[in-house]
Image (tube, grey):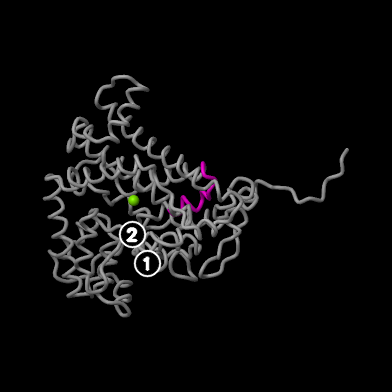
Amino acid sequence: MDQPTSEPMIDLRRYADREHLLLAAYAMHSRETAGRNHAETAHSYRGPFARDRDRILHSSAFRRLSGKMQVFTGEMGIYHRTRLTHTFEVASVARTMARVLRLNEDLTEALALMHDIGHPPFGHCGEDVLSHCMSAAGGFSHNGFALVIVEQLEQRYASFPGLNLSRETLAGQDVRAHKAEAAVGRSPMLEVQLVDVADSIAYDAHDVDDALQMGLLSIEELAELAIIRRALERTRGRHGVLPKSQLRQLLVHELIDLQVGDLLEQAIEAVRPFEGYCTDSVSESGLRLAHSETISRERSELESFLFNAVYRHERLIPVRKAASERLDTMFNILVRDPSRMPLRFRKRAEFNPIESVVGEYIAGMTDAFCDTQYRYAVDSLTGPLADW
Ligand code: MG
């Protein structure tokens, strides 16, 4: 019998070994992390990015995503996406792509789960109202607010505020908060880029699905667009002629699949020269993952169509207007009388501009919670509103 070798064996129970075996050199490996702002001992079986993912998943901001609508706010049905379902769909698309490109799936998933936690109630109109109300304090951005949540507002640990995420996870969200700067020079980590692509693939496809289901659009209207015709052709090629209800779901499936397939085809070629190089060399080169020219053009066409036909649809306008007025009224009540905010926000107001603190308090609310707090703020002249 052979003597046991003295070579250290790869042990797949160890995350560093799994990553060494499975990830490309240019992936962000856990062993290369720059650590956390508050030092913590390593976990025995979860890598730093898996811990980040779990911390985000268990945060209260993450759970509140189930009560925040993606696009269709108010009483517009229950089928359509919330930010929580959208987030899981983004995570699923991003993880699939990360696996094919041999990037770090834990980091990709952590970034995907975090990417929308800074969204205020009532979809895009919530963001517009807060940006306007907070203009004196620098405006409002949901991407920046996500960092405030994970670094300051979440209260999970006794020894530090926030979730104490790894520096790479924070940096990934910071890229989202500074998109213009990130578009030139050094490129963001590939894991960060994947989440961005997955986000836009997911929301375009899901907005098509929700708008069709709600009757805001018809398949015939959508078929004016090249990318929809491409997806319909694939659907017919695989399944023949189908009833409309089935066609909608398969169309959305093909729409996602064809964009993911296109992105991967391009990305596999783009990363090939970096085989064996580290993540920093890829960033240094400024490599940016992108769709093929044809799909990029067809995607832009879809996005401008959705902007006019869905986001500006007449059925959405009164719902948005009512939500905007409620947010604006509540913002002004609280700025005039900060004593009506929960204690921890009153404390934050001692060191931060009142507009910022009121904006943070409102931004953390779900749609329904915002409605009940608005009623209370308007009906009762005194007494603090509830904390979320
Ligand atoms: Mg998103």
Q: What numbered label is drawn on residue 148?
A: 1
Up the image or down, 351 lies above or below 124; here it is: below
Up the image or down, 152 lies above or below 240; here it is: below
Residue 99: give x, y in percent of width and height: 52, 43
Dot 2 alpha-carbon crowd within 10 angstroms: few under 14, some 14 to 19, many 20 or more: many
The CA distance from mark 1 to mark 2 is: 8 Å
Q: Is residue 109 magenta?
A: yes
Quadrant for the C terminus in the image:
bottom left
Check the image and name the residue furthest to the bottom. Answer: 350
The span picked out in magenta is 100-111
Dot 1 alpha-carbon crowd within 10 angstroms: few under 14, some 14 to 19, many 20 or more: some
Mark yes or no: residue 88 visible: no
Check the image and name the residue furthest to the top. Answer: 240
Residue at position x 19%, y 30% in the image: 220
Q: Which residue is mark 2?
A: 118
- Tag 1 near tag 2, CB within 8 Å: yes
Q: Is residue 336 magenta?
A: no
Q: Which quarter of the figure has residue 1?
A: top right
Mark sitting earlier along the chain (1/2): 2
Q: Secondary structure at mark 2?
A: loop
